Image (tube, rainbow, N blue to C red):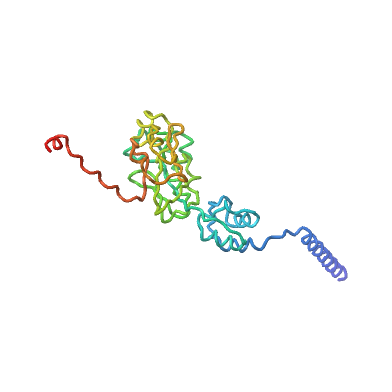
Amino acid sequence: MNVVLITIITLGALGAVAAIILYFVAQKFKVFEDPRIDQVEEVLPAANCGGCGFPGCRAFAEAMVKADDISTMNCPVGGAEVMAKAAAVLGKEVEAAAPKLAVVKCNGTCENRPRLTTYDGASTCAIAASLYGGETGCSYGCYGLGDCVEACTFDAIYMDEETGLPVVDEEKCVACGACVSACPKNIIELRKQGPKGRRVFVSCVNKDKGAVARKVCSAACIGCKKCEKECPFGAITVVNNLAYIDDSKCKLCRKCVVVCPTNAIHEVNFPPRKPKPAIESTEKKSAE
């Protein structure tokens, strides 16, 4: 009986000593966490989409608290309103970033880009891209297998059965960038939403020379540089046979759209253009 009692007392004493040691060790190596991290995290949308460039809202909150300057940080899901609240918690100011959304830069529909082969492998763009150049003659365009759709947690993108291309729902897109990362062909880009949702962009990523690009897709950019010469704001550059419009310089004049011979430049959410006035025939003019 004495042995049992002694054992219990001994174990209890060892446990108490261990607890005391652990307590002092914990106090010695305790990591202080700024309480503002919790406060900032509370105002974030808890989407944990990674669109801010950090692995989750908690990591973004920590980065904001530690940063001396948060002007370059942005929560695409929460937008300017959430960033203003987070900045207020930290006693800092942040300029409202221009809202963005995902843009699909491929117009290789079934009509514009005829299919030459049939893919019968795993139904993912990533695997298909590692195996071959696609079902058409254009090795740059969309595979149409929907990796971007699977990556979007906001149900903001879907595949159009008629065109075989992804379509972005502007009302749902939060510009998290998940679809951009998921696309192995880099045909999706985050661009400024623009005033009243109006945008002008080159819907092509084909870098082949003009004749080759036009042969495989009737709507491909052929690098003719007509748009670059027409733009009065220097917003368009042609590199590697492909035109690109800088949305920070573009003034939405749409002069480039008119001169593009392949209709590779798209204008979105603009009112319909006014019909050109009828040109009187030479015979009528002569009669008058």
The quadrant where residue 25 appears: bottom right
The quadrant where residue 187 appears: top left
> In the drawing, does residue 161 fall left or right of residue 25?
left
Residue 125 appears at what percent x and percent y?
A: 45, 41
> In the drawing, does residue 51 fall left or right of residue 115?
right
The quarter of the rendered structure image containing the N terminus is bottom right
> In the drawing, does residue 50 fall left or right of residue 121?
right
Q: Residue at x 57, y 52 (%)?
A: 73
Residue 57 appears at what percent x and percent y?
A: 57, 57
Q: Nearer the viewer, residue 178 or 274?
A: 274
Residue farthest toward the left in the current orientation of the protein: 287
Figure disc tally: 0
Q: Nearer the viewer, residue 286 or 255?
A: 286
Image height of 85 relative to 234, above or below = below
> In the drawing, does residue 216 fall left or right of residue 80?
left
Q: Residue at x 64, y 62 (%)?
A: 36
